[in-house]
């Protein structure tokens, strides 16, 4: 099974320092929905792994989060793609939970759910150092996109040395599917 794990905010949709609190604030990054559909059409199982501390901070409710996910899924489906799971951590840093990235709890849950036996072929696409550290800690392949917080993260000298770097999710998808007309950065 070929699985791709995506962070949500900053990878699939535009991010905000004020959090994405409702479905009207959820705006897809150009090309991201098409990229997910291409991955699905080429035999990849696509999941989301996202920290959502806004729930724990009472900035939005679980129902708001589910409404955002419904909108995201509907739009992805309209391009012919499907998300096979949305794994999220509602906790804040102060909760010291096992699931909040950079900890590996959500990724380990994905590995168990999909019976992944070769973690070395598991990609995770993120825009923050937390994403890269989490997937690297389980032996997977970290992918950084320059959307969202990615332009700042790319300058961080502590990103894992095996990190692949792309402008956005669509460019990573082109690389993965070995399509022409892409340039890694």
Image (spheres, rainbow, N blue to C red):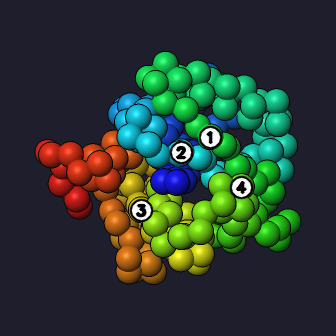
Image quarter in which the C terminus is found: bottom left
Q: Is residue 132 visible?
A: no
Q: Toward which corner of the image does residue 181 lie, by quadrant? A: top left
Residue 83 or residue 91, whichever sits in front: 83
Inter-mark Cα distance, 2 to 4: 13 Å
Residue carrying label 1: 84
Apparent side of residue 21 relative to residue 29 in the rendered image (left or right)? right
Answer above or below: position of 72 versus 165: above
Q: Which of the labelled discs sits on residue 113, or is there none?
A: 4
State the residue at coordinates (46%, 66%).
121
Mark 1 or mark 2: whose residue is earlier in sequence: 2
Callouts 3 and 2 close, C-beta under 8 Å: no
Mark 3 or mark 2: whose residue is earlier in sequence: 2
Front position among marks 3 and 1: 1
Answer above or below: position of 59 versus 158: above
> At which x and y percent is residue 20?
64, 37
Mark 4 or mark 1: whose residue is earlier in sequence: 1
Within 10 Å of disc 1 (Cα), the crowding (few <14, some 14-19, many 20+) is some
Mark 3 or mark 4: whose residue is earlier in sequence: 4
> At which x and y percent is residue 150?
42, 57
State the residue at coordinates (45%, 38%).
40
Callouts 2 and 4 close, C-beta under 8 Å: no
State the residue at coordinates (34%, 47%).
173
State the residue at coordinates (75%, 46%).
54
> At which x and y percent is residue 157?
40, 80
Residue carrying label 3: 143
Inter-mark Cα distance, 4 to 1: 11 Å
């Amino acid at each position: 099974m070929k699985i791709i794990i995506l962070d949500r905010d900053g990878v699939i949709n535009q991010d905000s320092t004020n959090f994405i609190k409702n479905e009207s604030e959820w705006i897809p990054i150009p090309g991201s929905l098409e990229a997910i559909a291409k991955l699905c059409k080429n035999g990849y199982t696509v999941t989301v792994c996202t920290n959502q501390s806004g729930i724990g901070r009472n900035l939005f409710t679980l129902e708001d989060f589910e409404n955002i996910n419904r909108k995201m899924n509907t739009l992805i489906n309209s391009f012919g793609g499907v998300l096979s799971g949305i794994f999220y951590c509602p906790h804040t840093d102060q909760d010291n939970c096992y699931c909040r990235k950079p900890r590996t709890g959500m990724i380990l849950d994905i590995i168990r759910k999909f019976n992944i036996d070769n973690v070395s072929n598991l990609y995770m696409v993120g825009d923050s150092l937390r994403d890269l550290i989490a997937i690297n800690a389980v032996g997977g392949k970290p992918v950084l996109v320059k959307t969202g917080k990615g332009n700042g993260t790319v300058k961080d000298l502590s990103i894992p040395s095996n990190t692949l770097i792309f402008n956005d999710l669509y460019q990573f998808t082109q690389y993965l599917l070995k399509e022409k007309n892409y340039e890694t950065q």
